[in-house]
Image (spheres, rainbow, N blue to C red):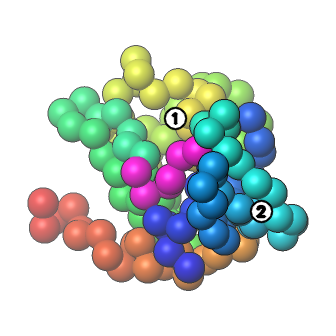
Amino acid sequence: MQLDEIIAIGGRPGLYKVAMQTRTGVVAVSLVDGKKITAGARNQLSLLSEINIYGLEKEVPLQAVFAMIFAKEDGKACSVKPKAPSDTLEAYFFDVFQDYDEERVYPSDIKKIIQWYNILVEKAPEVLAQEASDQPSETDA
């Protein structure tokens, strides 16, 4: 599985793997419980590989942020719980990604990133390991 096969569906918790495309949307399988659902044009579908996080200088792909968290946590689940207080979430995220734009990345966004990361660590760790190995180190930039 790769990050470009995984979607978030607006209004639905968790992450989904695209099983197949239809004329009106997609058939997706929940990574959390394995149930199949259909999502159409009325649903907001977000491909994880297309999501960017606002930085102070430039937008950073979500997969790069996942790679930063993966490196910090040594491939384990986040040490901070998604339901932690906002200041705790912001401090953790700043520790992981110092260049994020604090005015445009809200605690609710950080919560969602941590939830998604934890789902991927548990259900599809190969995706995060692949993304982490594909990212250049900070000294290469």
Residue 127 vertical placement versus 23 (above, below): below
- What residue is pinned by disc 1? 91
The boundaries of the magenta stretch are 45-50
Within-10-Å neighbours for mark 1: few <14, some 14–19, many 20+: few
The magenta stretch spans residue 46: yes
| SS at mark 2 in the image | strand
Q: CA distance from mark 1 to mark 2?
A: 30 Å
Query: Which residue occupies 56% across, 33% down?
Result: 109
Q: Quadrant of residue 75?
A: bottom right
Foreground pick, 123 / 101: 123
- What residue is pinned by disc 2? 30
Query: Which residue occupies 40% across, 51% down?
Result: 50
Foreground pick, 59 / 85: 59
In the rendered image, residue 79, in percent from the top left (x then y), is placed at 66, 55
Assign the C terminus to one quadrant of the image: bottom left
* For marks 1 and 2 on the same chain, the one whose residue lies earlier in the sequence: 2
